Image (cartoon, rainbow, N blue to C red):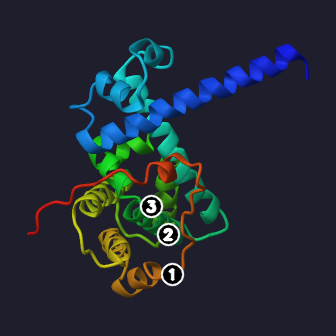
Amino acid sequence: MTTQDHRSRVAAEKRERMRMRLIESALHVFATKGVEASVIEDVIEAAGVSRGSFYNYFKTNEELLVAVLQVTSNEVFGQVEIVLAERSDPAERLACALRMVLYVTQRYRHLARFISRVGLAAMMQGSLAMVYMPRDLIGGIEAGRFSIANPLVGIDLVVGTTQAAIFTLSTHEGLAPDYPDEVVQHILLGLGMSAAKARRLAALPIEPVVLPPEALLARTAHIPVTPAPSV
């Protein structure tokens, strides 16, 4: 490796570290303050960088939000797809994928708060989830596993209920450990599956989503989440 190659590699690594520093700080700000309330000054302060440094990487708050969405969605949905690749039943894949997503948001509550702030549909946009979720839902209908007539209604049911459950996970203490299973069981019932089959799918063994220590969500797991008042 030439001296110029070494310098280029070091410069690229330094640039990527700064970019991830801004993304990490943005996740903290978005999760705690919300997207609409957050401004570039908040991210600059959290990252401890100058305004000029910020604009070397991102031109707007929206551009930064897109970067945070891409990193977090790839970390979660990428692992889910790998785990589910060997499952052949579309209904089983859908049920297990939803449970895995809910369990990872149960573990990383700052992720749950972030998704609650930006919306699950926004996080899924452009990710593998927008490929395999409709695929498995339609596949389940065609295979007679789901009796719902309109796939779009099914997508709304799945995304809407999952979004609501993630909000609950981000704001309430003392939920039952198997809360994700209960939610998915009721989603399956809503899709027209029998109670017995829904219970069985919601109880199947699943692989946990294990994030490496260097993953963004693992590095930011210390972000505080304020629970909602008891009701």
Which of the two discs, 2 and 1, labels the residue nearer the N terminus?
A: 2
Q: Quadrant of residue 82?
A: bottom right
Residue holding disc 2:
96
Task: Using residue 50 as the reference point, say whether residue 77 is left or right of it.
Answer: right
Q: Is residue 33 above or below residue 113?
A: above
Q: Quadrant of residue 83?
A: bottom right
Depicted 166 relative to depicted 208: above or below: above
Closer-to-camera residue (75/154):
75
How busy is the neighbourhood of tag 1: few (under 14 within 10 Å), some, or many (20 plus)?
few
Q: Is residue 123 above or below residue 26?
A: below
Residue 217 seen by the camera: yes
Q: Are marks 3 and 2 in contact (CB under 8 Å)?
A: no
For label 3, the residue is: 101
Q: Secondary structure at mark 2?
A: helix
Mark 2 neighbour class, 10 Å CA radius: few under 14, some 14 to 19, many 20 or more: many
Query: Helix or strand or loop: what does disc 1 sit on?
Result: loop
Q: Position of residue 196 (x, y in %)?
A: 38, 88
Q: CA distance from mark 3 to mark 2?
A: 9 Å
